[in-house]
Amino acid sequence: MCLGIPGRILDKYERNGLLYGRVDFGGIAKEICLAYVPEAKPGEYVIVHVGFAISRLDESEAMEQLALLREIDAAGEAAEEPQDMEKKA
Amino acid sequence: MRFISEYRDSTAVRHWLRELQNLVTRPWTIMEICGGQTHSFLRFGLDELLPKEITLVHGPGCPVCVTPVELIDKAVAIASRPEVIFCSFGDMLRVPGTKDDLLRVKSRGGDVRIVYSPLDAIDLAKQHPDRQVVFFAVGFETTAPANAMAVLQAAEAGLKNFSVLVAHVRVPPAIEAILSSPRNHVEGFLAAGHVCTVMGTEEYLPLADRYHTPIVVTGFEPADLLQGLAMCVAQLEAGKAEVEIQYSRSVRPEGNIVARRHIDQVFRIVDRKWRGIGMIPQSGLALRDEFLDFDAEQRFATADVTAEESPECIAGEVLQGHKKPMACPAFGTRCTPAHPLGAPMVSSEGACAAYYRYRRHEAG
């Protein structure tokens, strides 16, 4: 029930005094209430739960985490290779 | 999809598995609180890839599962009334009450509708001024801001034909109930990423401290879950008990301030009974006095509804991590998703449903 899906804000508008926007989920756009992320802008990613955006996705935080992972992995594989060579030898 | 597929990448998964293997030196028991995380572990088979030292136990983080049977019976009673349009998230429809469930009410001609958002129920109330629209407000803190907004919108529009049946629960008191139990064997927690997206981490600091237990706020994808476990194991191995955030792309320590303010405006904290577990102090939300006009329990006078649990269902043991679903004699035979004895077999977050879907072949 606490399912939250990341989607990208396409536009922002007001309806019944509430902030809404169309949010794109990999090609499917849906109207989402943006009242809890009033500062979010079109183009930004938000996490959406039962029709409400509950947070702005911190892209730099996400990118940093993923970049770090790639670095560690590259380093890890480089370190493992010579050992493998030794074993084979 | 962006920000999902990256976290299902096999390189990332392999990295965190290696990391876990390097970190762990002795057995640890870790509970993931959230039923969504339970399903991810089983769906992706991650539980079977973990170092053998790590035992995962599944927590009570399934709001559908812990909604007390009395409330299901009240929902059934209200939904059966001819003037009512009863709106609910889809998961609740098959949850068994004492005699009936909402799907059967619908099959008998009751106007039971599945909605995506509580605001859809507000729209229905506006479109049908001659009918009573009732929304089943189930959920943890993640869902509370949406439901609070529906009540505020109803108040602002002066809707006389909208009410909510509130079954809201809070996570930290449930963690405390588990940690303070004499039967507790959980040594570390993965806390729920979306609950903390709304609430932040403040309430978890005294729990980690008092029970000397690490709590890592974790996301829902394979790489998130394994990184969360690695962070938790690193703390356990070092004798630390801190609150850390793995799901940092969504969770800030203070949570979502606007959303928290709305929850506080509409709801107050109350003691609440959890299905299969019992009363947990301060673990629920109820409408504040100024919003009692929107309380479905008062509007439809359901106070005399009494309920009975299936004597065969061991949901309480499963929800507290004492037993795995397959330890239940009724699992997969007398209890299936189509004919459930208890709620954890119904919900897309229920542990029994996860084992039925992904591990049934092992029950043999």
Image (cartoon, rainbow, N blue to C red):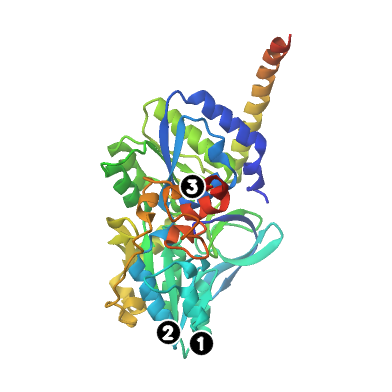
Residue B357 visible somewhere in the drawing:
yes
Separation of marks 2 and 3 at Cα, in angstroms: 36 Å
Residue at (73% x, 12% y) in the render: A88
Separation of marks 1 and 3 at Cα, in angstroms: 39 Å
Do pointers 2 and 3 mark residues of a single chain?
yes
* N-term-proximal mark, 1 vs 3: 1
Disc tally is 3
Name the chain under label 1: B
SS of the residue at dot 1?
loop
In the image, B220 versus B302, the foreground residue is B302
Do pointers 1 and 2 mark residues of a single chain?
yes
Name the residue beneath numbered marker 2. B161
Using the image, tell me which numbered label, if any, was put on residue A40: none
Using the image, tell me which numbered label, if any, was put on residue B251: 3
Name the chain under label 3: B
* N-term-proximal mark, 2 vs 3: 2
How packed is label 1: few (under 14 Cα within 10 Å), some, or many (20 or more)?
few
Residue contact between numbered discs 1 and 2, judged by CB atoms under 8 Å = yes
